[in-house]
Amino acid sequence: MVSEKWVCGTSRIAGCRFSIYPLSGDFVSIIEDALKKTNTSKVWMLTDDVSTCVRGRMSQVFDVVHAIFAHAAASGEHVVFSGTFSIGCPGDSSGDVYMSEDDVRLNEPPPGVDTAAQFALYPLNAPGYMGMIADAVEAAKSLGTFSGSVHYASRLDGSANDVFRTLEQVFAKAADEVSHLVMTATLSCNSPSPKPVRKSAGEAMAR
Ligand SMILES: Cc1ncc(C[n+]2csc(CCO)c2C)c(N)n1
């Protein structure tokens, strides 16, 4: 029998562990200012020397993570974000007090800069996972952000607002269908690198 300790959590607390990497000599103040400018009063949050972890209602987690990225992006520097979103993680309940917050968002992220993203959805213990991934791609297409499949991920391009709206929508839909879900995302803005040339709709050219 599976030990009860390792059964998927029944709490719908969501979370994201992420780092932002400003490729700038000013990286310390860009990170610290982005964290300070964001209203985090409806989430559990802890920052250390490697990353920041935000936990709470799904809407509030996306609001806070989006705002932190957008504030860093507004510096105009090339900023990279790398994060893992999760819901239904066994044992993830110590922040349940934040689940009694409402869904009213506290942040108005600055206007979204053009952002490139690669995300991957991992529905755990779900035999229908390929269908769920296909649904996520269809949702991104409807939102106008999908810009191709690459090995192990799907690519999104658009404003930071559009990219975060897509990430939240695909995560929320998949979370309705599976008890434990993980999504990874890497975002990049203000990059001096040209976007990849596409051979045809959706296919990035290998270099
Ligand atoms: C979102 C986020 N949280 C924490 C770090 C780790 N980190 C690296 S430099 C720095 C500022 C000086 O301590 C911090 C906190 C990160 N990169 N991004």
Image: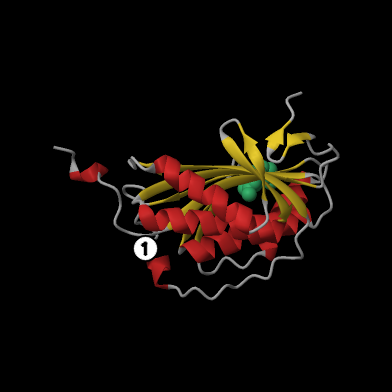
Element type where label 1 sits in the image: helix
* Amino acid bearing label 1: Asp
Residue 52 in view in this figure: no
The answer to whether residue 198 is left or right of residue 88 is right
Residue 158 in view in this figure: yes
Q: Residue 165 lies in what quarter of the image?
A: bottom right
The quadrant of the image that shows the N terminus is top left
User: As displayed, is residue 150 above or below residue 191?
Assistant: above
Q: Residue 28's x, y, as percent?
A: 74, 47
Judge by depth and name the residue closer to the eye, 120 or 192.
120
Q: Residue 167's x, y, as percent?
A: 57, 54
| Neighbours of disc 1 within 10 Å: few (<14), some (14-19), many (20+) | some
**Residue, disc 1:** 96
Residue at the limit of the structure toward the left, as seen here: 1
Q: Residue 86's x, y, as percent?
A: 45, 49
Q: Residue at x 53, y 60 (%)?
A: 61
Quarter of the image where ligand 1 sits:
top right
The answer to whether residue 73 is left or right of residue 154 is right
Judge by depth and name the residue closer to the eye, 116 or 19.
116
Q: Residue 149's x, y, as percent?
A: 62, 37
Q: Residue at x 80, y 39 (%)?
A: 195
